[in-house]
Image (cartoon, rainbow, N blue to C red):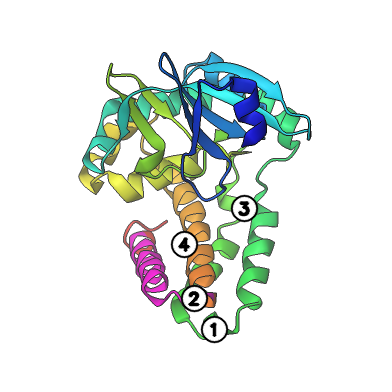
């Protein structure tokens, strides 16, 4: 990070901020603190303007062509599992899904949307390429459901989906502001992709109607069917991915999640 330190000046200390990509840094001087990231998406500027991520302070290009963004560093914490049930979470996700500015920008960057038929082909190829998972009856039933419900879960309202809504990506500042960070996996697709992940992972079943009310929609059979379709996709990929890497504990978790989803599908006649 010599080049970044040169931009900031000698009064700044730059340290890695963790994360899997190794492109995030924490910068501190006597007066200020900043969160730096190399080659973040131009999508960040729109997210900042709408108050979804901490404020973007500046963007600078290095001599090697890398682009560094600096965001306001806020004291706060990630949400815990229980805090994910707060209405603020539902309302911020709804704001994101309803934003035409976010949608226009991401379509300009990605130029693609999540298409169900392509997703199904990709999942089947992924499973087929894994000898370890071919004999799983649960996996077979899950893929069969994806195939038979493909036309039933089509949804023409496409929105910006975060696609990685674990509680570590929801940040609450000490002043009470809620942010959703880490947008590297964002896609344009069915909002049920995001809604389903939060409901299934964090919200007790008896509270689903209430949570969806805070989000701004009714709990319908159609929504449940779409949610479960996308949740099955996630768990199939997670299962095969971890199984191929001999991560048996994680693979067992995904297999149990698959079984639970299939049980819900049968019980609710989805």
Could you tell me residue 264's position as x and y percent?
34, 60
Circle 4 or circle 1, nearest the eye: 1
Q: Name the residue at 38% across, 22% down.
A: 74
Residue that lies at the very extreme toward the front in this rendered image: 10
Mark carried by residue 235: 4
Determine which residue is flagged by label 1: 132
Sequence-first tag of 4 and 1? 1
Residue 165 in sight: yes
Determine which residue is flagged by label 2: 243
Q: Magenta span has 184?
A: no
Mark carried by residue 65: none
Residue 101 in sight: no
Q: Name the residue at 48% across, 78% down.
A: 246
Contact? badges 1 and 2 (CB < 8 Å): yes
Whole-number angstrom distance, CA of label 1 to CA of label 2: 7 Å
* Residue 44 placement: quadrant: top right
Quick one: 256 or 192, which is closer to the camera? 256
Quadrant of the frame with the C terminus: bottom left
Q: Is residue 103 above or below residue 22?
A: above
Determine which residue is flagged by label 3: 151
**Crowd around label 3: few <14 · some 14–19 · many ≥20 (10 Å):** few
**Crowd around label 4: few <14 · some 14–19 · many ≥20 (10 Å):** many
Circle 4 or circle 3, nearest the eye: 4
Whole-number angstrom distance, CA of label 4 to CA of label 1: 16 Å
Whole-number angstrom distance, CA of label 3 to CA of label 2: 30 Å
């Amino acid at each position: 990070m010599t080049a970044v330190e040169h931009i900031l000046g000698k009064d700044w200390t730059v340290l890695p901020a963790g994360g899997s990509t190794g492109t995030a840094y924490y910068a501190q001087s006597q007066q200020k603190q900043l969160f730096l990231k190399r080659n973040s998406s131009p999508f960040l500027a729109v997210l900042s303007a709408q108050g979804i991520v901490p404020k973007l302070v500046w963007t600078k290009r290095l001599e090697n062509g890398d682009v560094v963004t600096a965001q306001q560093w806020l004291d706060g914490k990630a949400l815990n599992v229980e805090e994910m049930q707060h209405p603020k979470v539902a309302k911020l996700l709804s704001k994101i899904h309803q934003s035409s500015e976010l949608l226009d920008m991401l379509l300009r960057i990605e130029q693609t949307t999540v298409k169900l038929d392509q997703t199904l082909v990709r999942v089947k190829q992924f499973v087929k390429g894994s000898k370890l998972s071919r004999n799983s009856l649960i996996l077979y039933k899950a893929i069969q459901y994806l195939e038979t419900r493909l036309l039933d879960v089509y949804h023409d309202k496409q929105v910006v989906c975060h696609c990685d809504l674990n509680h570590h990506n929801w940040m609450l500042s000490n002043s009470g502001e809620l942010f959703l960070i880490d947008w590297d996996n964002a896609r344009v697709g069915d909002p049920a992709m995001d809604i389903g992940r939060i409901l299934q992972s964090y919200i007790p079943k008896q509270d689903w109607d209430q949570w969806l009310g805070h989000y701004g929609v009714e709990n319908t059979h159609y929504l449940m069917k779409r949610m479960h379709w996308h949740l099955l996709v996630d768990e199939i990929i997670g299962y095969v991915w971890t199984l191929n890497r001999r991560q048996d504990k994680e693979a067992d978790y995904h297999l149990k999640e698959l079984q639970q989803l299939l049980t819900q599908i049968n019980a609710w006649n989805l």
